[in-house]
Image (cartoon, helix red, strand yellow):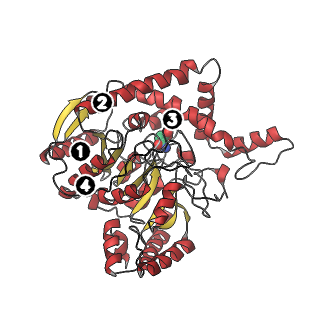
Amino acid sequence: MTDLINLTLTEMQAGLANGDFSSRELVQAALKRIESSDAKTHAFLHLAKESALKQAEESDRQRKTDKRQPLLGIPIAIKDVLSVESLPCTAGSKILEGYVPPFTATSVKKLIEAGVVIIGKTNTDEFAMGSSTENSAYGVTHNPWDLMRVPGGSSGGSAAAVAARYVPAALGTDTGGSVRQPASLCGVTGLKTTYGRVSRYGLIAFGSSLDTVGAFGRTAEDVAQIFSVMAGRDEKDATSADAPVPQIKFGGDALRGLKIGVPKEYFIGGIQPEVEEKTRAAIAQLKSLGAEIREISLPHTEYALPVYYIIAPAEASANLARFDGVRYGPRADADNLWDVFFKTRGGKFGPEVTRRVMIGTYALSAGYYDAYYGQAQKVRTLIKRDFEAAFGDVDLIAAPTAPETAFKIGEHVNDPLAMYLEDVFTLPANLAGVPGISFNCGFDNNNLPVGLQLIAPHFREDLLLHAAHAYQQVTDWHKRSPKF
Ligand code: GLN
């Protein structure tokens, strides 16, 4: 029975359809594995044991009828920034301790309608601000490849849950790299969708012009299934796009004739040598599969980090104003309203969130707005144009996902800049709104996974998934599993 947890989503689907096992058996196996091992990894903040078993039984009943949804009975996990009715939602923050949303995020709702079973909510940096899950108010998640190391972040719980074989797939969010970077550090496949591709309704907002909902799985094939279900226009999110959603059919020579650009600005000093070596080897492999490789330039890349760290905190400071102790979560005891605000926010927000609210408020304040936020928006446009120009010449861009493999817990906590540098290669895609994917392309000398990132033009997730799938057909990095 323990073998069930080693199946990919696609294999689970086949087994369920064949009657080899039931969804109840799958869910029981997942829960058993989580209960026996998650004390070591801490990928979950909340396990939805009872409701998961109920949903599994219901899906087994459903299977006997004609109405069989595509993901019927498949267990998945949800990052704890996405609202699921009746399950706690903390966003990794003490300010939302005990909060249970009365509604479900559209992305999750569509998956439920497609038949999934929700196993639980996964750990995240507080309000998705971070690159290691060390900013979670509920304790760090440990990387299944090396328990002394971080899983990346902010969707580190979801990435670790897939790497540890707790669930075949999980949802994450990517505002500056939070799906791709943990996918890279945990050796799984993670898709950041185009801005507007998946509804943000029910997602606790961080940076509203940057936030995207994405998915983790072990293979591109599995991620594609989650993606096709979640994507699409939602009238509850005015920024969701009315673009046709591709049903991705794999097969054929996906890479033949595809032009892939390798930006010279992404192979800079300071990047871990094995990361460069493995990503270059993966790019060579894409070439051997028929892709044409060219060096390209994205000249404004170096400004992405400072621009992001103005825009994201500015938007966060506005979005987080709603957490005042009145509308959600716990309320500090005080004699007057101002003190309720001060004490609740001052006592419940962690240091990184506080730092971002302060930076963001400063950048938006009268007299500084033009110098910071206004200027950052202009440079953001230049970064967007870099991608537009590049995609005039190439179909995809290939680069490392993160400058280094999983770092030790505590290694960067006292150095916010070192932590922010984790995102240098992922932030530009968020600023431009384009989709990206990260998948395992080898291991460093410490047996830690290295991720290759591919970036595509707006709404071309299909290209990313096809390319990653083609690579996974001829390599087996994605089949390795951590022993812990
Ligand atoms: N690490 C980045 C940050 O801290 C990105 C986070 C994210 O994508 N949610 O803002």
How far is the residue under mark 1 from the one under mark 2?
Answer: 15 Å
Residue under circle 2?
268
Q: Position of residue 215 (x, y in %)?
A: 41, 54
Does 97 sit left or right of 169 as displayed? right
Q: Nearer the viewer, residue 226 or 129?
A: 226
Helix or strand or loop: what does disc 1 sit on?
A: helix
Q: Amino acid at mark 2?
A: Ile
How far is the residue under mark 1 from the one under mark 3?
Answer: 27 Å
Residue drawn 26% across the image and 29% down it: 264
Residue under circle 1?
278
Which quadrant: the C terminus?
bottom left
Does 180 sit left or right of 121 as displayed? left
Residue under circle 3?
416
Point out the tag, 1 or 3, that comes first from the N-terminus.
1
Q: Nearer the viewer, residue 51 or 413?
A: 51
Point out the tag, 3 or 2, that comes first from the N-terminus.
2
Ligand 1 within 8 angstroms of badge 4 C-beta: no
Helix or strand or loop: what does disc 2 sit on?
A: loop
Point out the tag, 3 or 4, that comes first from the N-terminus.
3
Q: Amino acid at mark 3?
A: Pro
Q: In this orientation, does residue 442 appear?
A: no
Helix or strand or loop: what does disc 3 sit on?
A: helix
Q: Are marks 1 and 3 in contact (CB under 8 Å)?
A: no
How far is the residue under mark 3 from the one under mark 4?
Answer: 35 Å
The outermost residue toward the right is 335
Point out the tag, 4 or 1, that comes first from the N-terminus.
1
Residue under circle 4?
469
How far is the residue under mark 4 from the one under mark 2?
Answer: 28 Å
Helix or strand or loop: what does disc 4 sit on?
A: helix
Residue drawn 68% across the image and 46% down it: 348
